[in-house]
Image (cartoon, rainbow, N blue to C red):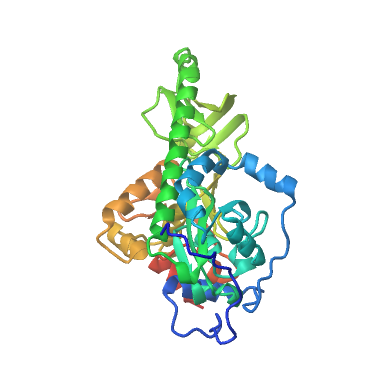
Amino acid sequence: MNQQPADPVVLTQPPDAAPTARHPIAAPRPLIGDSWQRMLHTAVDPDRVNHTGFLPLDEIEHRRRTSPLGEVLPTLRESLRSIAESGCHIVVVTDADGRVLWRAGSPAMRRSADRFELVEGAAWTEDVAGTNGIGTALVTGHPVQVHSTEHYVRALHQLTCAAAPLHDPRDGRLLGVVDVTCPAATTHPTTLALVSAVARVAEGELRIRHWESVERLRTAAAPLLARLDGQAVAVDRDGWTAAITGLPPMDRVALPEAPMAGEAWLPSLGRCVLEPLPGGWLVRVGPARRRDTAAPSRVILNLTCARSWTVTVSGPSGSWSQRLSPRHAELLFALAMRREGSSAAQLAADLFGDATREVTVRAELSRLRRNLAGVLAHRPYRFADEIAVELLRPENRLDLLPFSTAPVVRAARTSP
């Protein structure tokens, strides 16, 4: 994989005889087929690369400074140094919007990539560049390799892209993608595995940095909680517990989407008061724990926004909203589709196509039920009978949780 060719390979347009994305030689694999189906509902022209705008330099610099990926960029660079210097690869890191923030490669490869506008500030989401490693990894949330004619845009048929998404270990939020692109003729079978491993190493470094920050908050908050009467918990900005008093142990408190100082209602704790701390929040639990007498009455499951799925819980005590991880979005959708309830085996079949994966389902539902106290019931698993559930779906059914391969989601995408 590290052998250099005698002359750098220049990325050029494929010959006229090459098949186009609209007329493939054979049926594409499901991941690519799903992406092409999404392309039919966009304005992407399969006959030309059509980037519609580039970020100005000051905006690129701003995104670099504010992205958590900047913290692990040295790790990414060092891990992929041999690839970047091999003479036939270009290494790219994008943010969650698919905008290229950093790239590395030999001068010849950078010049070749310029022809396809694989440059800093360019967008490589599917709705701009069609099916490609970066854009499709952003949609699916999984590592993906797009080879040659699997690209929707014909001008990219001489390329192979291997890309892996990078997630924030604190909340599962998608941060961006690391991608290695090369001429299709020089593709190595281990490139996707390498890129995936590098992404996991970078996420591990982010996880270590996170727990170091939680430990600093614990050092500052523990003396404060020791002087308090009643129930309270100190959490970081993402709700991870640093110190606690008067309450059972808990790993995390599900905070509102945009927490503010003052009174707040949390489904898991009831009426609380939030006070800012350096790097987090002090959550004081109201003495009456009124959640027991003012149960939630309404849930809105909003799946309309790409990569930003939310659940909103409301009732007499107030309202609370939070973003959902991909897995929890799938679970709540499955429950909303079968209001009468599901066994763990049924949910496992809905999510994985494998009814034996009950342990995984029970573990995820246990986390959800802690956050959504009074909302979810069990035996069977379901939304509580007194809860009104509103499910908001995208206008285009193909945009419903596009990352998901769950049978219940795929069936909903194809149903009229």
Give residue 39's position: percent from left, percent from top: 58, 74
Q: Describe residue 343's horizontal placement relative to residue 319 as left or right.
A: left
Write down the quadrant of residue 382 in the picture: bottom left
Give residue 275's position: percent from left, percent from top: 58, 25
Please state the total of marks drawn on the protein image: 0
Residue 185, above or below 290: below
Q: Nearer the viewer, residue 34 or 64?
A: 64
Quadrant the N terminus occupies: bottom left
State the residue lying farthest toward the top: 227
State the residue lying farthest toward the front: 6
Q: Describe residue 383's horizontal placement relative to residue 275 as left or right.
A: left
Residue 95 visible? The answer is no
Q: Nearer the viewer, residue 208 or 20?
A: 20
What's the residue at 45%, 19% (across, down)? Answer: 230
Residue 368, above or below 144: above
Give residue 19's position: percent from left, percent from top: 53, 84
What's the residue at 69%, 66% (across, down)? Answer: 51
Residue 230, above or below 165: above
What's the residue at 47%, 39% (across, down)? Answer: 206
Residue 363 visible? The answer is yes
